[in-house]
Image: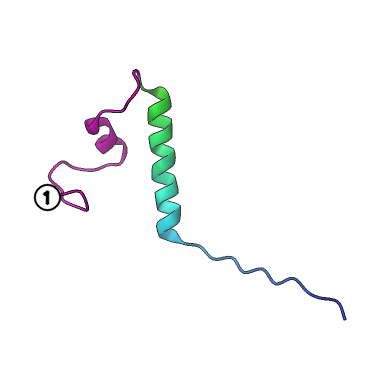
Amino acid sequence: MAKTLCTTTVQDHVALAEIELCGELIIAASAAEGERLSVDLIDEVLNVTPGEGGAGAQ
């Protein structure tokens, strides 16, 4: 009896979104002058509005 391979595709939408954001940061970093991205540029790339709150808000 031959074994059949069963493949299941699972999409983790949160992980895919995080990968996309990382890709955007990598593109911005490769195009930026200097060694580091400014906080303002990171916020712009990630489409974050200052004062919006979130995990880093105090």
The quarter of the picture where residue 35 lies is top left
**Location of mark 1 (residue):** 58
Residue 13, placed above or below residue 25: below
Q: Residue at x 35, y 18 (%)?
A: 33
Left or right of 53 in this view: 7: right
Residue 50 in magenta stretch:
yes
User: With respect to residue 31, does 19 lie above or below?
Assistant: below
Specify few, some or many for label 1: CA neighbours under 10 Å numbering under 14, 14-19, or 20 or more. Answer: few
Q: Position of residue 7 (x, y in %)?
A: 67, 68
Counting the numbered discs, the total is: 1
Q: Is residue 12 above or below residue 46?
A: below
In x, y percent, where is residue 52?
15, 48
Q: Is residue 27 left or right of residue 1?
A: left
- Quadrant (top left, top right, bottom left, bottom right) of the N terminus: bottom right
Residue 8 is left or right of residue 43, and the answer is right
Majority SS type along the magenta span: loop
Identified at 43% across, 31% down, the residue is 27
Quick one: SS at disc 1? Answer: loop
Q: Which residue appears at 74% of the width and 71% of the height? A: 5
Which of 12/36 is in front?
A: 36
**x, y percentage for residue 40?**
22, 32
Q: Specify the farthest residue to the right.
A: 1
Q: Position of residue 9 (x, y in %)?
A: 59, 65
Q: What's the coloring here?
A: rainbow
Query: Tag 1: residue type?
Result: Gln
Residue at position x 23%, y 43% in the image: 48
Q: Is residue 17 magenta?
A: no
Quarter residue 41 falls in: top left
Which segment did they paint magenta? 33-58
Name, please, the residue furthest toward the bottom.
1
